[in-house]
Amino acid sequence: MSEIAIKINNLGKLYYIGEFQPYKTLQESVIRFFNSIFKKSKDKFFKKDYIWALKDVSFEIEKAEVVGIIGRNGAGKSTLLKILSRITPPTEGYAEIYGKTASLLEIGTGFHSELTGRENIFFSAAVMGMKKKEIMHKFNQIVEFAEIGDFLDTPLKHYSSGMGTRLAFAIAAHLDSDILFVDEVLSVGDASFQKKCLGKIDDMARAGRTVLFVSHQMNQIRRLCQRCIWLEKGKIMAIGKTEEVASKYEASFSKLSSELEPREDLDYSPARFFKWEITSSKKEKPNVIDTFEPLEITFFLKVNRPLSYARHGIALYNSEGNLLWGTTTDRIKLDRGIHRLVYRLSTLPLKPGIYYWLVTLFEEHNLIDSWYCYPELLVATEPLACRWDEWAGFLNIPYEFKIHKIS
């Protein structure tokens, strides 16, 4: 039978906004007292605007699980981790945590800028609950992982943000905790260190530690997490297998994007892209496709003065900003008026998710227009990949596999 590491029941966090503030002085308390006596109503005297950062949040996480938390900015992800880390109390509900915790919520938490890297290791680790004997035992491992050996005795105020991130993660990762909370800090480090951190989280999970991981980078979520929780405006929208929840979350962007207004200010430059669509799409929305079928993609360009030596570029990016494909066409002649730039592709074998077109137009070496096209491209097909690694790579390539005995 599986053991529970975290149990959350009807958790809620209320924040007051506007002019309402707690009463900290005697004068404020007296004003509040007389205000209530004369029935001026404290609604009149103090604004009671508020927002539920979290509301009715309930779930359980088993020991040794790596669980991702996703959602847009303001969804309540960081608030949830702050409550679980006991930085802020909940307004309602409760959270039961079974085991020793470590948190990596903000860069520089537990650091002092005037202290050296060496001193901050002892200082920060002590704040996290490590005893001096433990710190001494793990010291060399922390320094080696953080890659700050040459700057160990340099004050932290001279560290770059990347160096500070490496040191903070190294300390948290080497703390003998049962549960680790990580909140979006890996996005600051370079690619090689991010890979190193993700490998360390894998190692911690295999060693039986529980990880709650917040990130906007869906490739990291898919690589690390067995399960995923999608928060939206403080409430749980979906919870379950990472593949299913991440796909629902990404699909929600197309609904928002399709509601955007058309591009404006078309007359202020020599030429301006203003619309795009998949003209061959069989879906209800002109920005949604299945893979494996032939595509015709059209970009609409308004030209306000003739261009004799234009150069047009197109590129396709995934939601993490990785370039997937691009090409350019030189020496284009464009007359004044509306033009359709049409691309025909035999297939676009992408995994399900959100993607972005970038179209550009140059006149010789001068940039005329550059546009990340809205709404985004939504790929809605089912993934085809190995069931043990359903999100390996960017492409969704169908294949056949056979074994032939030759002797």
Image (tube, rainbow, N blue to C red):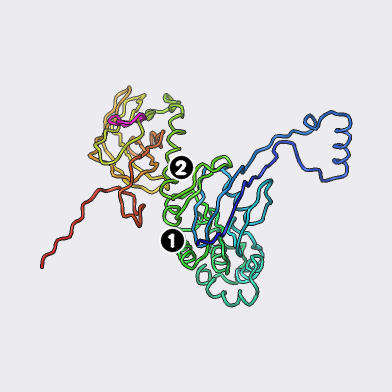
Q: Amino acid at mark 1?
A: Lys
Foreground: disc 2 or disc 1: 2
**Residue 162 numbered mark, or none:** none
Work out whether residue 7 or residue 358 is closer to the camera in this orientation and state it: 7
Residue, far top: 337
| Residue 362 covered by magenta stretch | no
Residue, far front: 1
Work out whether residue 171 or residue 370 is closer to the camera in this orientation and state it: 171
Which SS class for mark 2?
Answer: helix
For this view, does 375 lie left or right of residue 162?
left
Q: Amino acid at mark 2?
A: Tyr
Residue 153 versus residue 356 in the image, above or below: below
Which region of the structure is painted magenta?
Answer: 276-285
Question: Between disc 2 and disc 1, whose residue precedes?
Answer: 1
x, y percentage for residue 149?
53, 72
User: How far is mark 2 from mark 1, CA to CA?
Assistant: 24 Å
Where does label 2 land, which residue?
Answer: 249
Count of marks overlaid on the render: 2
The residue sitting at 38% across, 49% down in the picture is 322
x, y percentage for residue 288?
35, 35
Q: Residues within 10 Å of mark 2 (few under 14, many from 20)?
A: many
For this view, does 397 lie left or right of residue 189?
left
The residue sitting at 52% across, 50% down in the picture is 69
**Residue 195 numbered mark, or none:** 1
